[in-house]
Image: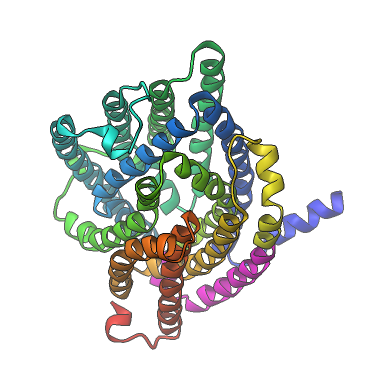
């Protein structure tokens, strides 16, 4: 055991300082994310049994719709991530604080405007029709949406502390914040299940408030200690810096909208073609295979900001070396996905029981999607780190235009059902992955010209 620990320690602490920092974050994040995933798997059947399949399907759709609002940051989160990392790489602490303060100010103004519009418009929306919900579901959906949106509005601004942590190549600390919220969430959920009858409103309040509280305490802690020199301040708000944030942010915004259409609309397509219970079936498979995608995010997260630093220091050989290692990990992951597909029915039965049946066809479709998604994510991470997003924007617009009709065609005309929805998304990711592979090769070999270098 001592020998194994020694070997692991040597592997983690060998290589470039930037690589060592990334590896340490990956190891810690794997442990924390593992607990996050475990808690999520425990929560899912408890919440499903608490409110039932149809009500839980509605909750998933609400989550998707609220996710739409998250993109009103017009890419400022990712813009701050790149600009903060760039400022740190140059040792410019003043600019880093100005970027932080200005981002907080802009996001607060945006969210106040969005909240005002939302609360006026929502009064005229029949939420039962939006969710295709049966009138037998005795829930005040309007109140639920208001509660969820109000909490999300706070998270919209508060989550910038996690952006700063990731930009400083400390994604593991972001995961600690998420884990603390999940632990509180599970504890309160168990109390609800044992003391109240199934209520979608209770579930919505719980799932909305706990992450908000976690972000509030995290902001107070980090801005009073590690990031005291970067704490947002009115004195450091400078809207001249907003141009840099907005120019880069708007590019990320278009890409975020593409991601929104590719993923968040899946639930809406399914509930309109079929019913909310099928959204639950779809999301059981999604959550099962998200174990792999979360693992990918853990590994890739430290390399975004690290690649930004390496790119601006012209250390392209480091980027090439890391990319080769990530592709090797991707190859190993394919075997993991195959095992997950083959064992999916067994896992579903233990995890969910007989309350919901997930077709093998859907599991296979998700397996294909995950393999394609992981490949594309490797190159997407490095392209995003450089800020050269123009060609990514064009490909994203193509995906936006094609994904919804393709999902409907695959689901209905090809008789693939809800499996067709995720296969359409996999096809969109494949196209994106090919394009970004070509651009990556051009950038790291200094042959990128024209649109490939913008």
Range of the magenta residues? 308-335
> Magenta region, mostly helix, strand or loop?
helix
Q: Nearer the viewer, residue 448 or 204?
A: 204
Residue 382 in view: no
Does the magenta segment cover residue 318? yes
Q: Residue at x 38, y 48 (%)?
A: 163
Residue 436: x %, y % from top left: 42, 75
Q: Nearer the viewer, residue 150 or 270?
A: 270
Q: Is residue 95 above or below residue 129?
A: below
In the rendered image, the quadrant that contains the C terminus is: bottom left
Residue 290 shown left or right of residue 78 in the figure: right
**Compared to 208, does 369 lie above or below?**
below
Q: Position of residue 265 (x, y in %)?
A: 35, 52
Report whether 347 appears left or right of 70. Answer: right
Q: Single out the residue that lies furthest toward the top.
A: 195
Q: Measuring from the top left, give residue 117's x and y in whole percent.
A: 14, 37
């Amino acid at each position: 055991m001592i020998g194994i620990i020694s070997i692991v320690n040597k592997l983690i602490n060998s290589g470039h300082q930037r690589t060592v920092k990334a590896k340490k974050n990956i190891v810690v994040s794997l442990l924390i994310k593992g607990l996050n995933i475990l808690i999520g798997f425990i929560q899912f059947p408890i919440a499903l049994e608490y409110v039932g399949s149809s009500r839980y399907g509605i909750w998933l759709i609400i989550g998707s719709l609220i996710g739409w609002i998250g993109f009103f940051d017009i890419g400022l989160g990712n813009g701050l991530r790149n600009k903060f990392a760039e400022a740190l790489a140059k040792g410019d602490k003043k600019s880093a604080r100005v970027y932080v303060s200005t981002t907080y100010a802009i996001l607060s103004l945006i969210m106040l405007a969005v909240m005002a519009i939302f609360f006026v418009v929502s009064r005229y929306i029949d939420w039962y029709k939006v969710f295709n919900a049966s009138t037998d579901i005795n829930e005040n959906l309007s109140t639920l949406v208001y509660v969820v949106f109000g909490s999300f509005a706070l998270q919209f601004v508060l989550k910038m502390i996690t952006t700063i942590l990731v930009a400083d190549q400390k994604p593991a600390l972001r995961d600690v914040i998420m884990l603390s919220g999940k632990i509180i969430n599970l504890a309160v959920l168990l109390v609800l299940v044992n003391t109240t009858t199934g209520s979608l409103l209770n579930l919505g309040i719980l799932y909305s408030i706990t992450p908000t509280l976690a972000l509030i305490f995290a902001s107070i802690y980090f801005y009073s200690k590690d990031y005291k020199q970067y704490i947002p301040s009115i004195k450091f708000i400078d809207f001249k810096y907003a141009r840099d944030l907005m120019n880069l942010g708007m590019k990320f915004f278009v890409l975020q909208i593409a991601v929104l259409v590719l993923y968040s609309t899946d639930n809406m397509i399914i509930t309109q073609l079929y019913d909310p219970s099928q959204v639950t079936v779809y999301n059981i498979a999604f959550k099962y295979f998200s174990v792999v995608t979360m693992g990918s995010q853990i590994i890739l997260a430290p390399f975004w900001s690290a690649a930004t630093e390496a790119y601006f220091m012209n250390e392209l050989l480091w980027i090439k070396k890391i990319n080769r290692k990530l592709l090797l990990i991707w190859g190993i992951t394919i075997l993991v996905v195959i095992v997950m597909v083959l064992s999916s029915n067994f896992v579903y039965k233990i995890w969910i029981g007989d309350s919901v049946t997930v077709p093998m066809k859907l599991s296979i479709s998700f397996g294909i999607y995950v393999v394609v998604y992981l490949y594309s994510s490797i190159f997407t991470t490095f392209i995003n780190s450089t800020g050269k997003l123009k060609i990514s924007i064009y490909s994203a617009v193509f995906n936006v235009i094609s994904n919804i009709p393709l999902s409907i065609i695959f689901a209905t005309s090809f008789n693939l059902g809800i499996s067709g929805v995720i296969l359409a998304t996999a096809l969109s990711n494949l196209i994106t992955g090919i394009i970004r592979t070509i651009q990556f090769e051009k950038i790291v070999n200094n042959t990128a010209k024209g649109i490939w270098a913008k």
